[in-house]
């Protein structure tokens, strides 16, 4: 990765680089807290202390076992928000880690520890960037906010969505939001996420008649009955995608039928499937097409639906352009907007924010043994976040 300021060294003040150096210290502080989802382990209390000292109004929100934080500085528009999560996924077998995942350690230009890339490193860069920005612009126009949760890696039912509901109830909306998810694919700066696909789960039960397998005329095998419909569902083109999204996909994740005995025709077959869908389709249109196929095959069935996530999209606008410029100015790379990958809390924030984009470090080690982040990436993130703030708040 291009070191910070190597692309355009004359454009960075000494103060900016001074605050960028703090990012490593802050990342180490956060990684050392064992915040296995949904336990925040004091991360947000540590953040609150620092944000309070910077003039932020702090609103904690506890929901179940989840700790959430909304912090805002200023009352005017535009409102720029940094969003992220302090919880991390389980470490897996500790003996497979080269070092303790909650004792951050530096090796060969990398910072190792659970959450280093996903996403305590980004939160550290948020904080250093805000400190640097306020040191230069203490009377800045607009407002800056933080939305932090400890329920992104878990069920995500008591986290960001609860904060969004509270803000929506009082009519508070965001103009711009950067979610610090690790987005870069190969090289730092190569990818930002300007949207995500939706996720729609289906649990299908196809009903048959149980019978002795030697007397098939006395039963109805639900697996045999379902097979042609499954083949059609798998072959269906749900949409062709659009300029921002690939085509919608349908995949079976589980299929089961039978009593455990080898001489029994099962009475039902259970199939679990998932759509990852683009904005070219809707929840309603996908459901309707599935029912049409199943009905045409004359199946006796029942189906339970669960919407895991709505798709969201931020087309090119002020946020995408400002962030792209900041990345290019810092590391000399123009990022590619992308909507690939799974879901993120951006799906909730999009309900109250005009523009939502995700940008963070390289994602190659997230959720893995020996998770790590490039120290240069943390430095660069701080500069990029600070520059984006300046562009969007017009200072």
Image (spheres, rainbow, N blue to C red):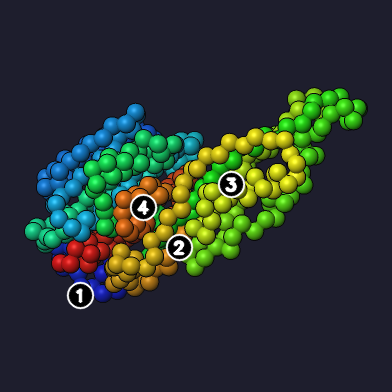
Measure the C-alpha gap from mark 2 to mark 3: 26 Å
Give the structural element (helix, strand or loop) at label 2.
strand
Asked whether residue 33 appears in the rendered view, the answer is no
Where does label 4 land, which residue? 350
Separation of disc 4 and disc 3 at Cα? 23 Å
Residue at the image position 44 percent from the left and 36 percent from the top: 155
* Among numbered discs 2 and 1, the one appearing first in the sequence: 1
- 266 or 290: which is nearer to us? 290
Name the mark nearer the viewer: 3 or 1: 3
Query: Do callouts 2 and 3 mark residues in contact (Cβ within 8 Å)?
Result: no
Side (left or right) of 377 relative to 234: left
Chain-order first, disc 3 or disc 1: 1
Q: Earlier in the sequence, mark 2 or mark 3?
A: 3
Q: Could you say where residue 237 lies in the image, as x and y percent from the top left? A: 64, 59
Judge depth for marks 2 and 1 and give the one in front: 2
Q: Which residue is mark 3?
A: 287
The disc at residue 10 is 1
Residue to which mark 2 is pinned: 338
Q: Are marks 4 and 2 in contact (CB under 8 Å)?
A: no
């Amino acid at each position: 990765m291009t070191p910070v300021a190597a692309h355009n060294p004359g454009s960075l003040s000494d103060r900016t680089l001074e605050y960028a150096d703090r990012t490593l210290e802050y990342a180490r502080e956060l990684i050392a807290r064992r915040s296995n989802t949904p336990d925040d382990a004091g991360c947000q209390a540590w953040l609150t202390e620092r944000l309070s000292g910077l003039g932020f109004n702090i609103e904690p929100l506890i929901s179940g076992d989840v700790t959430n934080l909304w912090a805002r500085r200023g009352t005017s528009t535009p409102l720029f928000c940094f969003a992220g999560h302090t919880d991390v996924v389980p470490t897996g077998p500790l003996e497979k880690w080269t070092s303790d995942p909650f004792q951050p350690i530096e090796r060969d230009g990398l910072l190792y520890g659970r959450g280093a890339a996903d996403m305590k490193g980004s939160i550290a860069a948020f904080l250093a960037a805000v400190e640097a920005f306020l040191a230069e612009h203490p009377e800045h126009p607009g407002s800056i906010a933080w939305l932090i949760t400890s329920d992104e890696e878990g069920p995500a039912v008591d986290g960001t969505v609860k904060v969004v509901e509270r803000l929506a109830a009082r009519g508070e909306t965001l103009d711009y939001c950067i979610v610090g998810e690790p987005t870069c694919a190969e090289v730092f700066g190569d990818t930002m996420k300007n949207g995500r696909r939706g996720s729609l789960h289906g649990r299908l039960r196809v009903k048959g008649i149980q019978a002795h397998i030697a007397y098939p005329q006395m039963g109805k095998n639900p697996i045999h009955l379902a097979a042609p419909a499954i083949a059609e569902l798998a072959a269906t083109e749900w949409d062709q995608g659009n300029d921002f999204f690939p085509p919608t996909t349908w995949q079976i994740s589980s299929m089961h039928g039978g009593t455990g005995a080898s001489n029994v025709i099962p009475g039902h077959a259970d199939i679990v499937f998932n759509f990852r869908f683009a904005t070219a389709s809707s929840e309603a249109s996908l459901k309707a097409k599935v029912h049409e196929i199943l009905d045409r095959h004359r199946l006796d069935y029942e189906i339970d639906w669960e919407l895991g996530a709505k798709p969201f999209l931020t087309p090119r606008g002020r946020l995408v352009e400002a962030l792209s410029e900041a990345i290019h100015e810092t590391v000399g790379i123009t990022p590619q907007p992308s909507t690939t990958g799974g879901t993120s809390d951006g799906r909730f924030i999009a309900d109250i924010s005009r523009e939502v984009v995700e940008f963070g470090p390289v994602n190659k080690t997230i959720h893995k043994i020996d998770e790590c982040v490039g120290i240069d990436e943390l430095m660069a993130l701080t500069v990029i976040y600070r520059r984006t703030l300046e562009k969007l708040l017009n200072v």
